[in-house]
Image: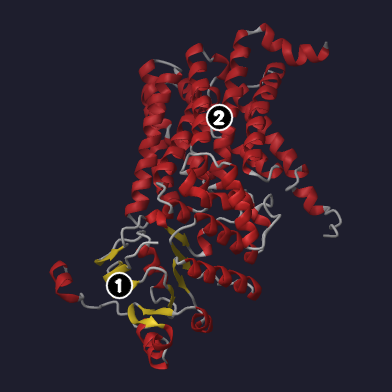
Amino acid sequence: MSGRAISFRNVTVAYGRHPAVHHVSGILEPGSLTAIAGPNGAGKSTFLRALMGELPLAEGSIDRAGLSIRDFAYLPQAADIDRRFPLTVADTVLLGAWRKTGAFGGADAACARDARTALAGVGLSGFEGRPIGSLSAGQFQRVLFARLLLQDAPVIVLDEPFTAIDGRTTRDLLDIVRRWHGDGRTVVAVLHDFEQVRTHFPRTLLLARHAVGWGPTDEVLSPGNLLRARAMAERWDEEAAPCGPGNRLRA
Amino acid sequence: MILHSLLIEPFAEYGFMRRALVASLALGLGSGPVGVLLMLRRMSLVGDAMSHAVLPGAAVGYLAAGGLSLPAMGLGGMAAGFGVALLSGLVSRTTELREDASFATFYLASLALGVLIVSLKGSNVDLLHVLFGTILAIDDDALYLVGAIASLTLVTLAVVYRPLVAECFDPGFLRAVGGRGPLYHFLFLFLVVVNLVAGFQALGTLMAVGMMMLPAAVAQLWARSLPAMFLVSAATGAASGFVGLIASFRLGFASGPTIILTAALIYGVSLLLGPAGALRRLFPRPHLSA
């Protein structure tokens, strides 16, 4: 795995000039397992999308430690996926072989074997031919994790992977996250459940547009920080003044 | 012998019927799969809008060539279609308007412009030809063009199948693996436009989209996997062409509408009988034990 850390310097992302992520700086050490927590509207998903290069930065920079965007396996929120699309489970998982097949290459027998192994790894052996429309939410999330397994990426980015998923599936998928951590992969996940974060994630970024805290989970999730996070996320001022000397020039 | 005289004879006797048959088979093969993807991308109405949007270009081509000429109308139609597709793509990416809204505004303007152009220079007969087509008057050039478009469509779909499916099913994933989603989106719109152009002479600008959407709807009622949907859709299109031509020959109906009505009839039957259709819902079979 890459030896350098992914670093964020003064990252600001704005929607219509209102910052959703505001002056966030910090690093993701290679092989670290980090949770991103915070209240609704704290900019957690925005932060991940900025990391994936999907949103332009209003200010600051992200150093991806020499990795290309293809080295990141990204699981966006489930709402972005058309689950009624007529694909089979096997086809969906095989999309994960993209780094091998590219957009146009064929999937060979090795890819198919890897896909079966990945499906077995998420407890869905024998589901290869099922249409994805017939799966439950939990089963579908397992399929997406199988696709992530097949992607075999050094950095794994998960956006609310356990929302609306049953307890057993969550446990199984958390096992996979731990295994990725054991492999030395860098894992970042947006999570809502502070208990989960405390139990399974050594490091946490507590986000409320600003980084309230970024470091060891026990220190970051202190009662004082949580209170501050809630207060900060609820602040919204239509008439907010431009921020910082750099922006004042433009305003 | 009755079957022979019913199904084969019209095509054996008359060259124009043979040409019309080849054209409608090719149309079905190309437009069917494109229609399936259009529907799965929830862009059914975009297909409809496109068929109106190409009118001014087709009208200019029609008048420039001095009559129904598929190459001239096709060229004009393609230019107008891409103009509208690019403009509405641009509008939806730079303003608050969504793509379907900007499509609607552009196609209405485009349709009005097209009718205006034809009515300024041509006669009512011209307008009818442009709007509703004349499949029985297809010449060799037009036939080659329709065949080339069907071939191009199938080959292109085969090549870009994976990114196209990914873009449709999970656009976020395609972005994350570095695929160029907008590129495939426009490539797909290109296929929609060229297939509409192929349908011009046969069915006219207004009904060309019928060869796309009706077979695609039939496919959704019968098949559950994407390749199967492609097959059902292409077969339905081709069968509508064949049956529609025979019916119009025997009954003396206009051929374009008869072909589309045949497709509509297949759709109606599928609505009732298909595995995803109404009868299955009204009279459910007992559930399985596991």
- Subunit ID for the residue under disc 2: B
Residue A2 in percent (x, y) is at 36, 62
Q: Quadrant of residue A70?
A: bottom left
In the image, are marks 2 and 1 on the same chain?
A: no
Q: What crowding class fits label 1: few (fewer than 14 Cα within 10 Å), some (14-19), or many (20 or more)?
A: some
Is A135 rendered above or below residue B5? below
Which quarter of the rendering shows the N terminus of chain B?
Answer: top right
Judged from this view, the residue extending furthest toward the bottom is A224
- Horizontal and vertical percent position of residue B140: 51, 12
Tell me which amino acid carries mark 2: Gly
In this rendering, the answer to whether B223 lies above or below A21 is above
Instruction: Indicate left or right for B181 with A238 as reference.
Output: right
Element type at marker 2? Answer: helix
Amino acid type at circle 1 is: Pro
> Which residue is drawn at the image coordinates 68% and 6% (left, top)?
B13
Q: Nearer the viewer, residue B107 or A158?
A: A158
- Residue B30, which numbered label? 2
SS assignment at label 1: strand
Q: Is residue A250 above or below residue B149?
A: below
Q: Are marks 2 and 1 in contact (CB under 8 Å)?
A: no
Q: How is the image coloured?
A: secondary structure
Residue located 76% across and 49% down the image:
B278
Q: CA distance from mark 2 to mark 1?
A: 48 Å
Give the image quarter of residue A176.
bottom right
Q: Chain of mark 1?
A: A
For the point 62% across and 22% down, the residue is: B255
Q: Which residue is mark 1?
A: A19
* Residue drawn at the location 80% of the way across and 15% of the way down: B3
Can the viewer see residue B76 in this picture? yes
